[in-house]
Amino acid sequence: MEKLRLDAEAGDAEAQCALARCYDKGVGVEQDFAKSAYWLRLAAEQGDALAQFNLGCAYADGEGVEQDSKEAFTWWRRAAEAGDADAQYNVGTCYDCAEGVEQDYTKAVSWYDKAAEQGCMESQYELGRHYQYGYGVVEDKAFAANWYRRAAEQGHAQAQCSLGVMYDYGMGIEKDKAEAVRLYRLAAEQDNAQACCNLGCSYASGDGVEQDDRQAVMWTCKGAELGNFVALYNMGCAYEHGEGVEQNEQLAVEWYRRAAEADYVKAQILLANWYDLGHNVQQDDEQAVYWYRRAAELGDASAQFEVGFHYFHGQGVQQSYAQAAEWYAKAAEQGYALAQSCLGFMYDCGRGVKEDAEKAARLYRAAAEQGLATAAYNLALMYDNGRGVAANAAEAVHWYRVAADLEHMEACCNLGRCYAVGEGVEQDYSQAFRWFSRAAELGDALAYYHLGIMYSEGEGMPVDGAKAAACFRKAAEKGDPSAQLNLALALVRGDGVEQDEYEAFSWMQSAAEGGKLVAWYNLGKMYELGVGVEADVAEALNCYRRGVELGSADAQFRLGEAYEEGKLGLTKDPDEAFRLYTLAAEQELPEAEYALCVLYVQGEAIEADPQMAAEWCMRAAKGGMLQAQYFLGYLYAEGLGLHKNLTLAREWYEKAAAAGHEAAQEALAELKKKDNRK
């Protein structure tokens, strides 16, 4: 030792390097990293490559000197340039991982190549990895397999495993499951965790080796104990399904939890789903959110969506639309369609974000283009209503069709409506029937209602009251108020169904309670006339008044009649009658418009006004009321409130007469007599 020290002090680089090693290991001297670094520096500065390499290691680990990645790189670089293979590998690693130098995969590959050519198996493995994934070089699976093979032949466990994967899936080389198993086994016997896991998978599937669940569990368990998170997860699968071990749900949960704790996203999401549903664990929304969040923070888009979903609904966390929007946005940025659609909905409604219909439309489109039916339907609605985009019926039809082809119930119904009315597409009752039928098969109440209308009106088919009533009944039973109303009317008339006033009354009640305004009027009439229920004037009034409150023009008109005539137990009140007629007339109810005409003619409840009478009569006539058409003809003939015009008088008489109005027919005949006399 004394001679070694003297030689080192005399400047012998080899002796300095050896003395440094003694201090590093505590051989012949007390271990002292600082003194080891001191002697290494002296040797390194004389160009000793081994000393330069070891001094770089000292700086990398902070042994005897302050940790300094840049200094480590500097000394390794000097050793590498002198041809030291280990230093060349380390320089490659520095460029690979941006340690002490800016990341540069191309330079990393260059240094790995130098070391690999000297037989450095770690560099050979790294070259294989870089060629496999295209890091710093053009991806080349065959070249990758070649470098993995060279490292594997030297016993590099991870290279053996990676080459096994290449054989397993036929990447860069011909697929050979048996060779994959052989390589996995070589690496597994060196305690390579991934190889243990892969070998377990091979035994489980029987690929390249005879299927053996027990061997599968043995190797998987070894991989799991070595810390491989996929193996941890697979052990959970084994216990969950009883493959190679006795089924044990509790142990399955424990293994899945270990995989999740190791940040295996698949396990985290599985646990979250189980806590969400209470499957194999006690239902726990907070635990579900915990595991979704763990996976979300690792960047998993589906988990980010789930965290947003739980914030939106307040499940396991305090409800927050703002937080929901933030998490949906993270997933949406990764192209997750459900998140794009939900975030679009939030912008559409202004929940948690400022309302922005244009942004909503863009998000719906992004999700729709990925084949999400709900998003396609919502985008169609936006084109239908001109919200966030310019109104475009043809575009609406396009997106309704996209959603309908994906079996979206409401989209099928709306597409049927577009064909029925010729909106955005040429009118085609056969196509309307097809899409209404498909929506009905999917359970859409409104579609059954539309089918009922087609049968009752004979749209593209013969009128069929029985089929119409059957469709109305199906829609009514699903709670559609319009269908309930139509079914009630069919039951009253016995149209396509056996007459049953009592059942009709029940359905009319349902329609009224469901918000169908005219149903309140009809219900009032049924109480008034004792149809399907014992006559009850007080209840009739209640129904009419309820209809008036809700804005039913028919109820307003009927109650107006009652006040004008002093019926239904009411005292005559011309002013109230006028008010109610006006409300109904403003909704373009022809009967109410004509009633106002009569009041202006009579000049009793209000001051007579021939011009106003003529105006309201004109409105009622254009609305199709025969009596108004006849009377308008009379007003033209006599020049009351209008300039006398026998030509127009004749036109209005003819309209009413053609529809069977007797007085109009007589007036028309009288005009013809006058013409003949001329």
Image (cartoon, rainbow, N blue to C red):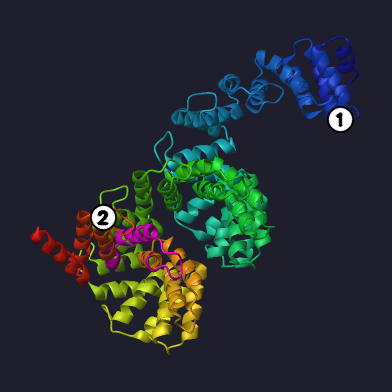
Q: Is residue 102 above or below residue 456?
A: above
Foreground disc of the pair 2, 1: 2
Asked whether residue 59 is drawn in magenta, I would say no
The amino acid marked with disc number 2 is Lys
Q: Quadrant of residue 122?
A: top right
From the viewer's side, name the closer residue of 12 and 107: 107
Residue 26 badge: 1
Which amino acid type is shown beneath numbered disc 1? Answer: Gly
Q: Is residue 626 magenta?
A: yes
Residue 388 % position (x, y): 48, 43
Q: What x and y, as percent, mark residue 286?
A: 68, 60
- Residue contact between numbered discs 2 and 1, judged by CB atoms under 8 Å: no
Quarter location, residue 431: bottom left
The residue tagged 2 is 644
Relative to 652, is 4 on the left or the right? right
In the rendered view, tell whether residue 467 sits above or below residue 647.
Answer: below
Label 1 sits on a secondary structure element that is loop
> Mark 2 and mark 1: span between their CA atoms?
128 Å
Q: Please state the extent of the stretch shown in magenta in the rendering.
A: 601-629
Residue furthest out toward the front: 678
Locate the N terminus by quadrant. top right
Quarter of the rendering containing residue 9: top right
